[in-house]
Image (cartoon, coloured by chain):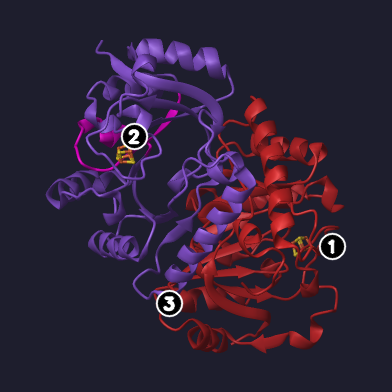
Chain colours: A red, B purple
Amino acid sequence: MNSIPVLEIFGPTIQGEGMVVGRKTMFVRTAGCDYRCSWCDSAFTWDGSGKADIQKMTADEIWDQLVAVGGERFDHVTISGGNPALLSAIGELVQLLHTKGIQTALETQGSRWQPWMLDIDDLTLSPKPPSSGMKTNFNVLDQIIEQLRPQNNTSLKVVVFDDADFEYATDIHSRYKDVPFFLQVGNDDITSTDTVALTQHLLGRYEWLVDKTIASTAMNNVRVLPQVHTLLWGNKRGV
Amino acid sequence: MNSIPVLEIFGPTIQGEGMVVGRKTMFVRTAGCDYRCSWCDSAFTWDGSGKADIQKMTADEIWDQLVAVGGERFDHVTISGGNPALLSAIGELVQLLHTKGIQTALETQGSRWQPWMLDIDDLTLSPKPPSSGMKTNFNVLDQIIEQLRPQNNTSLKVVVFDDADFEYATDIHSRYKDVPFFLQVGNDDITSTDTVALTQHLLGRYEWLVDKTIASTAMNNVRVLPQVHTLLWGNKRGV
Ligand code: SF4
Ligand code: SF4
């Protein structure tokens, strides 16, 4: 068995974002990312600060740890990062989880293809808008979406911080009209520890994004969501 | 054409609840309900206070009004009440909307069957827990779910205010294991006009519901959501 660099295994909690928002789930967070987004809220997965916490684990070891932490209180596992699509060994983990009757969700920016993407139950592709400082490789993204299309397991999610990001989101939605599309408000204060103030601020940003979506005739078949876990728990990790 | 008693037509806005939470949509609210829930947040649909606002409208007239209000900024219409399942004429409206390329969502407590339920794109059955003061007729609900099962368009949603409601929700989920299941935190202060205080209060209630769900081994394949529109706009109507 190949090993996977794991940074955190926690839960059960709820999924705070995207196509299965609110779903009771466990989280497995992998280390490493090919991007360096300016506002990354998981920079510890790639900036060296979490290095000491990385454990190389096989799929079996991850399963044992999931059961040790979550007991019988879960039937769904979310794999996040970093970018888990850097890791071919995720395929073994997903297969193992399925044999245990566990559903899987995974999020990646869509910069790399992995054949196991076909097996994920709820796959979120989250290409990064201009404010991230990253550039989307549309050749790769086109090919990924082409291969996933028959599977019907995929949604697109774009995090929006400003007007330029909203334009980018509009372009993504019109490029892949048939893929379920989610807009998410960006958290522009990832260090605040004042959860009440942060909640009110993020709800204000969410209202701004809702208003922009309401006004746009190019954004009809879309869903607009806040980060629900941030409304609940602010910037705390591991919840 | 038969006429439908309509209380409000507004939007576009976002759907604040359930299976398509966040979806950009128009709302058509019908008058009349066979229930009298203690905490009903739409009591004006049945308690006489909205009587002067009721308009009898045909499906064509409703469509004209939707376009007058929403222009080209929508492709989805949510029909709510009251209990729209009291009205057989909803079938004509749904058919008309589909010919216009519009998707439809509808919510009802599941106390009455209508054949047009098969045609709704996103149908939410929301049986009412003990705190409502209402009693679920499980013969009717069983039959409705039986007929809808092949359609795959249905989800169950239970609003939870207290421990007894959570037990009721657990029973509903185990009775209909295969139907996507949503837990929603109840708004126990439907008169507050202090939106900030209400938001914080409801997020606290939401955390309570999340914690109960996390702790329960009978509640794994579930989704737990707040009322997103109430977090944004408090108890304001027509948004
Ligand atoms: S792709 Fe995700 S994990 Fe990677 S830098 Fe960007 S936000 Fe962070
Ligand atoms: S079923 Fe819905 S509309 Fe009717 S009384 Fe109960 S909460 Fe109000």
The residue identified by callout 2 is B120
Q: Quadrant of the C terminus of chain B?
A: top right
Three-letter residue code for mark 1: Arg
Whether label 1 lies within 8 Å of ligand 1 gets the answer yes
* Kind of element beneath mark 2: loop
Q: Nearer the viewer, residue A221 or A120?
A: A221
Task: For label 2, count other residues whose C-alpha is less than 10 Å away and answer few (under 14), some (14-19) or many (20+).
Answer: many
The residue identified by callout 1 is A36
Image height of B183 relative to B27, above or below:
below
The residue identified by callout 3 is A73
**Residue B180 location in percent, x, y?**
36, 55
Question: Which residue is at a point 59% across and 78% down the rendered structure image?
Answer: A10
Q: Please state the chain letter of the residue tagged with numbered disc 3 in the rendered image.
A: A
Q: Is residue A5 magenta?
A: no
**Residue B150 location in percent, x, y?**
25, 47
Whether label 2 lies within 8 Å of ligand 2 gets the answer no
Three-letter residue code for mark 2: Ile
Question: Which residue is at a point 58% across and 53% down the rendered structure image?
Answer: A18
Position of B25 compared to B96: left or right? right
Q: Is residue B121 magenta?
A: yes
